[in-house]
Image (cartoon, helix red, strand yellow):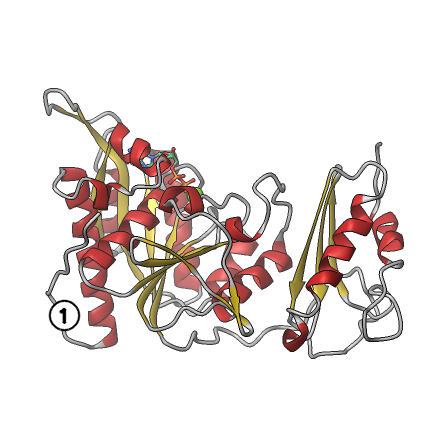
Amino acid sequence: MAGLTKEQVLDALRKVRHPHRPGDVVSLGMISGVVVKGGNVGLSIEVDPAEARALEPLRRACEDAVKRLPGVTSATAVLTAERAAGSASAAPASLARPEAPARPAVPGVKAIIAVASGKGGVGKSTTAVNLAMGLAVLGERVGLLDADIYGPSLPRMTGAAGRPSARGAKLQPMESYGVKVMSMGFLVEEDTPMIWRGPMVQSAIQQMLADVDWGELDVMVVDLPPGTGDAQLTMAQRVPLAGAVIVSTPQDIALLDARKAINMFRKVDVPILGIVENMSYYCCPKCGHRAEIFAHGGARRCAERFGVDFLAEIPLDPEIRELSDAGRPIVLARPDSPQAQAYLGLAASVRDKLAELAGGKVRRFPRILWL
Ligand SMILES: Nc1ncnc2c1ncn2[C@@H]1O[C@H](COP(=O)(O)OP(=O)(O)O)[C@@H](O)[C@H]1O
Ligand SMILES: [Mg+2]
């Protein structure tokens, strides 16, 4: 059926009553966002964080009510906690929210770093995973947060499967090779289209930072969504970042986007830890011949021009992709390979830069991880 509207969705939601309060979810002002894309519907439901667990049946009731509408192929509802509890909104379907406090720190987490790229497909997630695991090999306590809500790939790349469990008001992160991992991919069905945008993305990320029991971490690596648009800018502003690693391929177009990403972080005063050139050159697995397929070295020149550090060049290598698809990051699966060494070098540079930024001493006691 063509032309499913927000109004129809809200009408369906008016039939869902709050379990403890008089009224339905719409008239109580709890629906803070509705996105309709074809037959796919995304909703955010504003709740008091203390009630979040108790309201899980309400969340499902909202999904079910929307799914019953003709023409709806999927419905995904998330509980969010942004406004003060009980404050009924005059404009229930509006996505507008009051400004959240800027960059609340995550207790117990010493440094949060973003892995970012100007555009998608340059290997940002692959780099984020191998960097995080590389930091763990070096003995750091590491978390990995998949903020790429449109295309979460960390569940597959880390091999972590299942659903995070709740303990008290907090979700327990998943774990992969000693690294704590959280991703929207664990929380929604795999075939649910990712249709959240803007403000909903923001609240999901803030929830994954604040409502997950990360424990004590030296570093949290955040895989940001690609691009330099408003959503990325807001995220760079809201997440308390100690620094950003920019991933680019050597091609001119990608480098142009990398420059935009550098400028974006500069605008919001996030230090650039440096640039990684991914798919930098091709190393023939048979003869070891190194072929520079895309005029390699562009990222190094870009880094020089922008006055930021060049952190690593990672070869284009079929094994990196194969192991990544199998949930076994190469940095752990083939620790002696030159590719793994390149990631370990990246991890060591990032660790040293964070120590420098924090004014602390540089630690050099690698811990061996066994697979
Ligand atoms: N250095 C590399 N060598 C070979 N394949 C790579 C490399 N880096 C990434 N890939 C592959 O390229 C694709 C895109 O990488 P991904 O990390 O998902 O990019 P992004 O997160 O930037 O969209 C994936 O299939 C990944 O396995
Ligand atoms: Mg990705």
* Quarter residue 74 falls in: top right
Instruction: Tell me if residue 287 comes above or below residue 43 in the rendering.
Output: above
Q: Position of residue 66 (x, y in %)?
A: 80, 48
Please say whether residue 96 is visible from this viewpoint. no
* Quarter residue 277 falls in: top left
| Location of ligand 1 given as a quarter of the image | top left
Residue at position x 88%, y 74% in the image: 22
Instruction: Tell me if residue 195 comes above or below residue 242 in the rendering.
Output: above
Question: Left or right: where does residue 136 sit relative to residue 241?
Answer: left
Secondary structure at badge 1 equals loop
Residue at position x 27%, y 35% in the image: 320
Of residues 235 and 19, the one nearer the viewer is 19
- Label 1 beta carbon less than 8 Å to ligand 1: no
Q: Position of residue 319 (x, y in %)?
A: 25, 31
The three-letter amino acid code for the residue at tag 1 is Val
Residue linked to disc 1: 362
Of residues 305 and 114, the one nearer the viewer is 114
Please say whether residue 244 is visible from this viewpoint. yes
Question: Left or right: where does residue 294 sit relative to residue 3?
Answer: left
**Quarter the N terminus occupies:** top right
Instruction: Tell me if residue 28 comes above or below residue 348 in the rendering.
Output: below
